[in-house]
Amino acid sequence: MIFKPFMREGFMPLPVAFISSISKNGIRNIAPYSCIMPVLRPLDLICLASAKRRDTLVNIRETGDFVVNLAGTDLADKVVPTAKFSPPEADEFKEAGLEEKPSALIKAPGIAGCYAWVECGLFKAYEESDYVLIMGKVLRLEVDDKFLRPDGTLDVAKTKPLMMIGSKKGMHFCTVADIERFEPFGAMFPNGKDPLAAKYE
Ligand SMILES: Cc1cc2nc3c(=O)[nH]c(=O)nc-3n(C[C@H](O)[C@H](O)[C@H](O)COP(=O)(O)O)c2cc1C
């Protein structure tokens, strides 16, 4: 079947991350974002695409920081409440019944009950006519120990990261499965050595 070009997210499952931010007047905000990705291994940059009319965007520009909260499927019922329009003066933690997890390095608070918290500082905003690409610099990355395997990798069966596939009518929420296949980064290189290996030590 051939699909319309804008249907691309129907075939590439996307993460559903909750972006928490705070306004210059101290109002807490939450919004789910799926257009989000890391920028190249091993950089510490993360990129999110934002429509222009977003309190999240205003807050990030005004205060210079935000948290990317990574959630499991247990928080799927918080997606629509945090995606619905709320005026900028509404405290979206209270509205959604979510507790705050104070951040260590930035003003924006994280969300309790997520499995990972990525504290970011605004690095750059690339403005286009109807969207803005926000590039964040990751300042601190915390993962709840109970979701880690002994080797420090994420136990996806336990975590059930919240993801989404778009369709003509809406969003199908899903998660990922580990297929128990591992390849070292070095496998991509002719000498079997990862040129970035020292970064991970
Ligand atoms: C699963 C999901 C993913 C979303 N992803 C994005 C996104 O990547 N970028 C965006 O601008 N809006 C996205 N939205 C819409 C915003 O979450 C929504 O407009 C929200 O009300 C914005 O809140 P704010 O004005 O408080 O920032 C998404 C909504 C849902 C339900």
Image: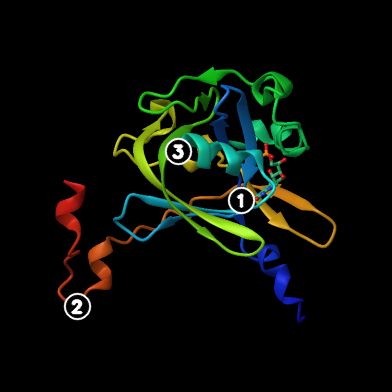
Q: Is residue 1 left or right of residue 37?
A: right
Closer to the camera in the image, 102 or 2: 102
Q: What's the residue at 64%, 64% (across, down)?
A: 129
How far apart marks 2 and 3 lie (CA) works out to: 42 Å
- Tell me the tag on residue 190: 2
What SS does tag 1 mark?
Answer: loop
How far apart marks 2 and 1 lie (CA) works out to: 35 Å
Residue lying farthest to the right in this orientation? 169
Q: Quadrant of residue 132?
A: bottom right
Q: Residue beneath label 1, please?
A: 34
For label 2, the crowd category at 10 Å Cα-Cα, with few meaning under 14, some 14 to 19 and many 20 or more, is: few
Q: What's the residue at 85%, 57% (across, down)?
A: 169
Q: Position of residue 118 (x, y in %)?
A: 43, 37
N-term mark: 3 or 1 = 1
Question: Marks 2 and 1: which is nearer the front?
Answer: 1
What SS does tag 2 mark?
Answer: loop
The amino acid sitting under disc 3 is Gly
Kindly tell me whether residue 99 is visible in this rendering. yes
Q: Quadrant of residue 22?
A: top right
Q: What's the residue at 50%, 25% (across, down)?
A: 109
- Tell me the tag on residue 156: none
Q: Is residue 4 left or right of residue 37?
A: right
The vertical placement of 96 against 173, above or below, is above
Q: Residue beneath label 3, please?
A: 64
Q: Position of residue 136 (x, y in %)?
A: 42, 47
- Rendering quadrant holding ligand 1: top right
N-term mark: 2 or 1 = 1
Mark 1 residue's CB less than 8 Å from ligand 1:
yes
Q: Position of residue 95 (x, y in %)?
A: 73, 22
Closer to the camera in the image, 119 or 57: 57
